[in-house]
Image (tube, rainbow, N blue to C red):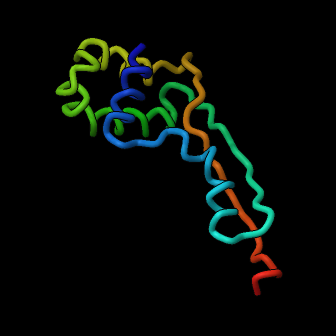
Amino acid sequence: MAWRALIAWGQDNGVDWLIGRGLPRMVGAAGFARPQATTDVQNIRGGDRGALYFKLFLAEVRDRVLASGRLDAPTLDAATALLDDPDLWTQCWMMTAVWGRKDPATS
């Protein structure tokens, strides 16, 4: 539930969590021919550097998230504590790479 609240908070603040899905279309619209894309989903384990990244992120946005009323401090603290648990495995962000070629017809 805490992650859903954080996702909603991000959307309220202009974060486009799904931008990667639109990148191939954006590259094509920019004039590149036959855009291609690949996506990699990271798996993180509690205590790893990916978990540390999320802990730092949560520390950075903590005051703003709490002020939004979407999450209370005990829930946010519990979610943050999970990131120290080496038995916790979760998937996180998706990294999308997109490429294309200059369209020879427009050269």
Question: In the picture shown, does residue 105 fall above or below 42?
Answer: below
Residue at 21 percent across and 20 percent down: it is 69
Which of 67 and 87 lies nearest the eye of the viewer? Answer: 67
Residue at 61 percent across and 48 percent down: it is 22
Report x, y in % for residue 96. 64, 49
Which of 98 and 29 lies nearest the eye of the viewer? Answer: 29
State which quarter of the image contains the C terminus.
Answer: bottom right
Which of 89 and 6 lies nearest the eye of the viewer? Answer: 6
Lateral position of residue 75 relative to residue 17, left or right: left
Lateral position of residue 99 relative to residue 60, left or right: right
Lateral position of residue 74 relative to residue 87, left or right: left
Q: How many numbered marks are there?
A: 0
Lateral position of residue 61 relative to residue 91, left or right: left
Which quarter of the figure has residue 106?
A: bottom right
Which quarter of the figure has residue 71?
A: top left
- Residue projecting furthest to the bottom: 107
State which quarter of the image contains the N terminus.
Answer: top left
Residue at 38 percent across and 27 percent down: it is 8
Question: In the picture shown, does residue 78 fall above or below 48?
Answer: above
Report x, y in % for residue 56. 34, 38
Report x, y in % for residue 3. 43, 22
Report x, y in % for residue 86. 53, 21
Residue at 19 percent across and 32 percent down: it is 63
Which quarter of the figure has residue 21?
A: top right
